[in-house]
């Protein structure tokens, strides 16, 4: 070992020790947070070995839930484990009518529960171990190479065969051509057909080695003068779960640190996905006005008051550089999605 390496070794040991304790702290926090959840429809006895599961925390999502459920059922999800955080729009009643949904409710603070991740962590710990688990928001629809023909069972079998524990994805903000609150009908992609092709940039953050991807339309429209405040766009939504795993910052980062090495952001040729993000469906202005009062979606809500106020004006996000979404091959051509060895596989 060279002298510089010897000098760095104690620091590495100290960092590794701290991260192990951070992981244990978060795991205990998630386990305790399970006490805040009231089971409304616990159908988890239906879950069988090999089932692919979805975990989500939501509030007032009747606008999105029918397409959300249909999309993931078509991909092969067997069971949905959902936390409803005090909805008052009928989301809970809609979910209660779904035979493949287990539902918990809580009126506790979303922000104090690490933006719902403590609650989701409790369910992952209890029900996710050994399963391929998708952890997504109700406004995120996963697309990946050849997803129209090959479902999640084939995808996860491929990942298992390669010894890969998960798949990263870029959260792609979709938007309309007109003002954000202009009435529209149809699917998410019919209402929000456009996206910003870039630029996107990625940094590796120490000591967790988590990636930090930023850029796109929200940075262009709302954070051009302070780009470091713009939203984080990389996620690790699909993981073969283990009880020793924990999400740290939404699904943007995980512990142990090696899980953050699964994807390096746009330009990485490894197999990855796109989370089609429907934040800007009609109604975003009213949601943003509510968030100005609730202050539940950022660690430092005061720093994002201007962002939410701008959204209440329902601005036009379209610009001449915007592209119409045309599917996963377009994403691959733009370098926003990788195929790895997946497209050469035979697992139909």
Image (cartoon, rainbow, N blue to C red):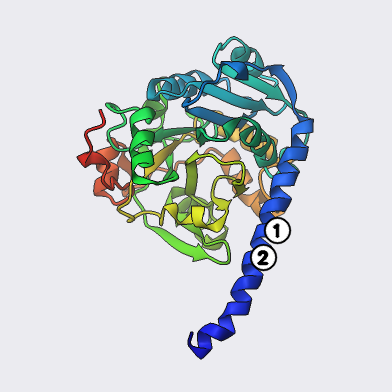
Contact between labelled residues 2 and 1, with CB atoms less than 8 Å apart: yes
Q: Quadrant of residue 73?
A: top left
Q: Nearer the viewer, residue 334 or 99?
A: 99
Residue sitting at x 62%, y 66%: 16
Q: How many marks?
A: 2
- Image quarter (top left, top right, bottom left or bottom right) of the C terminus: top left
Q: Horizontal and vertical percent for residue 287?
A: 62, 33
The x and y percentages for residue 153 are: 37, 28
Nearest to the observer: residue 308 or residue 343: 343
Residue highlighted by disc 2: 17
* In the depicted structure, whether residue 220 falls above or below residue 172: below
Q: Residue at x 40, y 32 (%)?
A: 192
* Viewer-closest of 341 and 316: 341
Question: Mark 1 sits on what residue?
Answer: 21
**Going 51% across and 31% down the picture, which residue do you hit?**
181
Q: Quadrant of residue 329?
A: top left
Q: Is residue 308 left or right of residue 52?
A: right
Question: In the image, is residue 98 above or below residue 246?
Answer: above
Image disc number at residue 277: none
> Which residue is nearer to you in this view: 186 or 129?
129
Q: Position of residue 113 (x, y in %)?
A: 73, 41
Q: Residue drawn 49% across and 18% down?
A: 66
**Farthest residue in the bottom direction?**
3
**SS under mark 1:** helix
User: On screen, 280 above or below 103?
Assistant: below
Could you tell me residue 8's position as x and y percent? 57, 81
Element class at badge 2: helix
Neighbour tally class for label 2: few under 14, some 14-19, many 20 plus, Cα within 10 Å = few
What whole-number distance in Å separates the C-alpha atoms at marks 1 and 2? 6 Å
């Amino acid at each position: 070992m060279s002298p510089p390496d010897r000098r760095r070794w104690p620091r590495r040991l100290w960092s590794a020790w701290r991260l192990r304790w951070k992981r244990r702290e978060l795991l205990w926090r998630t386990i305790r947070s399970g006490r805040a959840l009231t089971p409304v429809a616990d159908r988890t006895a239906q879950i069988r070995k090999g089932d692919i599961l979805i975990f989500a925390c939501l509030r007032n999502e009747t606008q999105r839930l029918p397409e959300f459920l249909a999309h993931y059922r078509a991909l092969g999800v067997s069971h949905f484990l959902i936390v409803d955080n005090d909805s008052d729009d009928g989301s809970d009643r809609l979910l209660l009518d779904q035979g493949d949904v287990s539902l918990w409710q809580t009126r506790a603070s979303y922000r104090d529960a690490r933006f719902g991740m403590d609650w989701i962590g409790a369910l992952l710990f209890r029900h996710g171990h050994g399963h391929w688990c998708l952890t997504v928001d109700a406004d995120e629809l996963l697309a990946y190479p050849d997803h129209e023909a090959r479902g999640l069972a084939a995808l996860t079998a491929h990942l298992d065969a390669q010894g890969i524990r998960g798949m990263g994805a870029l959260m792609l903000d979709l938007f309309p051509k007109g003002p954000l609150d202009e009435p529209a009908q149809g699917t998410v992609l019919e209402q929000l057909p456009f996206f910003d092709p870039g630029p996107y940039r990625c940094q590796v953050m120490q000591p967790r080695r988590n990636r930090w991807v930023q850029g796109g339309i929200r940075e262009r429209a709302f954070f051009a003068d302070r780009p470091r405040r713009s939203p984080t766009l990389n996620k690790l939504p699909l993981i073969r779960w283990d009880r020793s795993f924990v999400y740290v910052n939404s699904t943007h980062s995980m512990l142990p640190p090696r899980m953050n090495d699964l994807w390096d952001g746009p330009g990485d040729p490894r197999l990855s996905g796109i989370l089609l993000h429907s934040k800007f469906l009609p109604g975003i202005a009213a949601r943003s006005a509510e968030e100005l009062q609730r202050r539940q979606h950022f660690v430092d809500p005061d720093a994002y008051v201007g962002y939410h106020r701008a959204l209440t004006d329902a601005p036009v996000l379209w610009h001449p550089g915007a592209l119409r979404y045309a599917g996963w091959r377009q994403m691959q051509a733009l370098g926003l999605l990788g195929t790895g060895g997946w497209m050469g596989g035979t697992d139909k």
